[in-house]
Image (cartoon, rainbow, N blue to C red):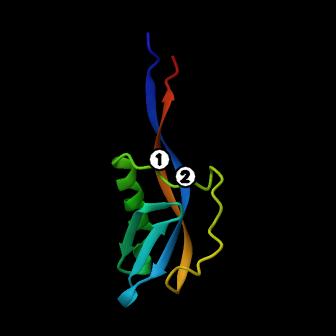
Amino acid sequence: MAAATVKEERMLHYYAIAEAGDGGSWWISFPGRDGIVSAADDAGQIVQQAQDALASAAMHGGRLPPSIEDGAAPPDDLSEFQSPAMVVVIPFAVSVARAAAE
């Protein structure tokens, strides 16, 4: 008989780069994952928009960037980004499958 699996959520944290756009907007990207991007109308929306981008990537089978818990280091060179640019830590709940206790 096959072991049953249970999905549970685990909170992980990811580094994102937010760089200034026009009119107070922000472009959001994740180091090492060029395909996961988003935009925010203002700085107050950066975390939510980044979480939405991670959720969309996970829902469509995309690989998420390495998490801080998995050893990701913060980007140390933002010179290629539009100034001002900043590193933002994004909390994100990831579904993880585990064997169910019998």
Residue lying at the far top of the rendered structure:
1
**Against 22, is 102 above or below?**
above
Q: CA distance from mark 1 to mark 2?
A: 7 Å
Q: Which residue is mark 1?
A: 94
Tell me which label, 1 or 2, sits earlier in the chain. 2
The amino acid on which the numbered mark 2 sits, given as a three-letter code, is Leu
Determine whether label 1 and label 2 are within 8 Å by CB.
yes
Give residue 66's position: percent from left, percent from top: 56, 53
Give residue 23's position: percent from left, percent from top: 36, 90
Instruction: Classify residue 45 by image quadrant.
Output: bottom left
The amino acid on which the numbered mark 1 sits, given as a three-letter code, is Val
Q: Residues within 10 Å of mark 2 (few under 14, many from 20)?
A: some
Q: Residues within 10 Å of mark 1 (few under 14, many from 20)?
A: some
Residue in the picture at 37% in, 45% down? 61
In the picture, the disc for residue 79 is: none
Residue in the picture at 55% in, 57% down? 13
Q: Which residue is mark 2?
A: 12
* Front-most of residues 88 and 34: 34
**Against 38, is 68 above or below?**
above
| Circle 1 SS class | strand
Q: Is residue 101 left or right of residue 27?
A: right
Residue in the picture at 44% in, 29% down? 6
| Circle 2 SS class | strand
Give residue 12's position: percent from left, percent from top: 54, 52
**Against 25, is 92 above or below?**
above
Residue in the picture at 35% in, 48% down? 59
* Front-most of residues 27 and 81: 81
Give residue 89's position: percent from left, percent from top: 56, 65
Say which quadrant the N terminus sits in: top left
